[in-house]
Image (spheres, helix red, strand yellow):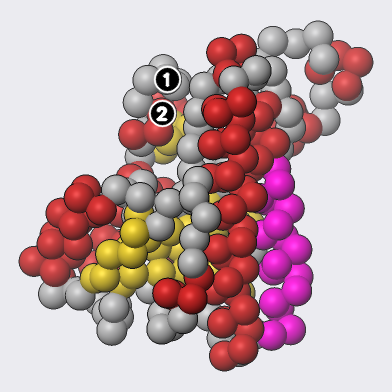
Amino acid sequence: MIILGSNSDVAIAFVEKVLSEGQRFPEVYLFTSNVEKTEKLAQHFFAKYEQKCEIIHFDLTQENDFSKLDYINSELLFCASGFLGKNSEEGLYDDWNTKQIVEINYSKLIVLINYFAKKFETRGSGTIIGLSSVAGERGRQSNFIYGSAKAGFTAYLAGLRNYLFHKKVHVMTVIPGFMDTQMTADIETPKPLTAQPNQAADIIYKAYLKKRNVVYVTFVWWGIMMIIRNVPEFIFKKMKM
């Protein structure tokens, strides 16, 4: 199993869920830009589940040598890589902020996923699970740079799913709403609309077993985004969201 964004709360909860259900892998490959933090995670998975893990140092903001990944083979890829950055008012004209958001959430991320997608296609099997966001459903003034990257990622996963279907590789898009994670620790979110990582992991795991295509972590967000997507633009542009 390949995990991109290994220190994500949702990624950790998903690996816990998969292992607690009795699945084991020759190796779990934990991709991370923070090796020290991920080492503790690998030790935890081995101590609790006797699951061997290999830590792969990989920074999406840097140029990377993909040849060093040639030996990695897997039937399951779970992508939780993400960077929220500063909101649009604070970070709109901050070039560093914009670059980090775009590279980590989209431009360099899809190059990495493509690398493994080709391996899955050649083998003719496997599942790719990607976490996008409701922020990608419609650009809103509060976070439209992040939202635009996630919109691109959602479209990428949809196209990849379409392309790989006939290659017997499944691609699943997960669309969370508010999540109680490290990424949103400084943001006050409404509790009824906020999912816990363990709750998200359970939903994602069940959807993975059923080979679902697009999954909203909490169904209420499907309804909320349906309304937001259908607000006429001449009204929407005047709203503060």
Quarter of the image for residue 197 reads: top left
Q: CA distance from mark 2 to mark 1?
A: 5 Å
Say what amino acid the circle numbered 2 marks.
Thr
Q: Is residue 166 magenta?
A: yes
Q: Residue at x 19, y 74 (%)?
A: 51
Assess disc 2: are there few (<14), some (14-19) or many (≥20) residues with their C-alpha within 10 Å of its C-alpha: few
Residue under numbered circle 1: 187
Q: Residue at x 20, y 50 (%)?
A: 36
Q: Residue at x 34, y 69 (%)?
A: 29
Q: Which element carries disc 2, helix, strand or loop? A: helix
Q: Is residue 173 magenta?
A: no
Assess disc 1: are there few (<14), some (14-19) or many (≥20) residues with their C-alpha within 10 Å of its C-alpha: few
- Counting from the top left corner in percent of width and height, residue 100 is at 54, 36
- Pick whichever, 167 or 89, lies toward us: 89
Q: Is residue 12 above or below residue 184?
A: below
> In the image as oriented, which residue stretches furthest toward the bottom?
123
Helix, strand or loop for the magenta stretch, by majority = helix
- Counting from the top left corner in percent of width and height, residue 207 is at 51, 63
Q: Which mark is residue 225?
A: none
Task: Tell me if label 2 and label 1 are in contact, CB under 8 Å.
Answer: yes
- Quadrant of the snapshot with the N terminus: bottom left
Residue under numbered circle 2: 184
Quarter of the image for residue 159 reads: bottom right
